[in-house]
């Protein structure tokens, strides 16, 4: 019974790690795409979005490290 619970927990952790890796890949892709676009945004808007993406990437990295799924 305990082994089934541990296996279930491991599967949940693996699933969450996969979700986080997908999210970070999407954030990086968005970041790279926006860096290549002409700068037609309203001043001040892009830096806040950029900062929000960077903050979220850092949060994801921290969570991945806690889950043991960080890639170096």
Image (cartoon, rainbow, N blue to C red):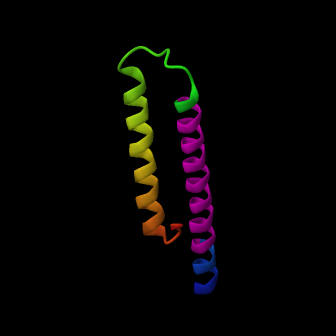
Exactly how many numbered labels are in the figure?
0
Q: Position of residue 27 (x, y in %)?
A: 54, 42
Task: Judge by depth and name the residue closer to the eye, 14 or 34.
Answer: 34
Q: Is residue 18 magenta?
A: yes
Q: Position of residue 26 (x, y in %)?
A: 60, 43
Task: Judge by depth and name the residue closer to the eye, 16 or 60.
Answer: 60
Residue pictured at 37% horizontal, 29% vertical: 48
Task: Judge by depth and name the residue closer to the eye, 16 or 71.
Answer: 71
Residue pictured at 63% horizontal, 78% vertical: 7
In the depicted structure, whether residue 69 falls above or below residue 7: above
Magenta-highlighted residues: 9-34
To which quarter of the image does residue 5 belong?
Answer: bottom right
Residue pictured at 51% horizontal, 67% vertical: 70
In the depicted structure, whether residue 24 falls above or below residue 42: below
In the depicted structure, whether residue 13 falls above or below residue 48: below
- Which quadrant would the N terminus be assigned to in this image? bottom right
Q: Is residue 21 magenta?
A: yes
- The answer to whether residue 43 is left or right of residue 57 is left
Task: Judge by depth and name the residue closer to the eye, 35 or 21.
Answer: 35
- The answer to whether residue 48 is left or right of residue 12 is left
To which quarter of the image does residue 20 belong?
Answer: bottom right
In the depicted structure, whether residue 35 falls above or below residue 62: above
Q: Main secondary structure of the magenta part?
A: helix
Residue pictured at 38% horizontal, 36% vertical: 51
Q: Position of residue 59 (x, y in %)?
A: 41, 52
- The answer to whether residue 51 is left or right of residue 10 is left
């Amino acid at each position: 019974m305990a082994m089934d619970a541990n296996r279930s927990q491991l599967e949940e952790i693996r699933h969450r790690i996969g979700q986080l890796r997908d999210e970070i890949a999407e954030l990086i892709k968005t970041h790279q795409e926006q860096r290549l676009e002409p700068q037609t945004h309203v001043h001040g808007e892009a830096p806040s979005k950029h900062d929000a993406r960077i903050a979220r990437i850092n949060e994801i990295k921290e969570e991945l490290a806690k889950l043991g799924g960080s890639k170096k």
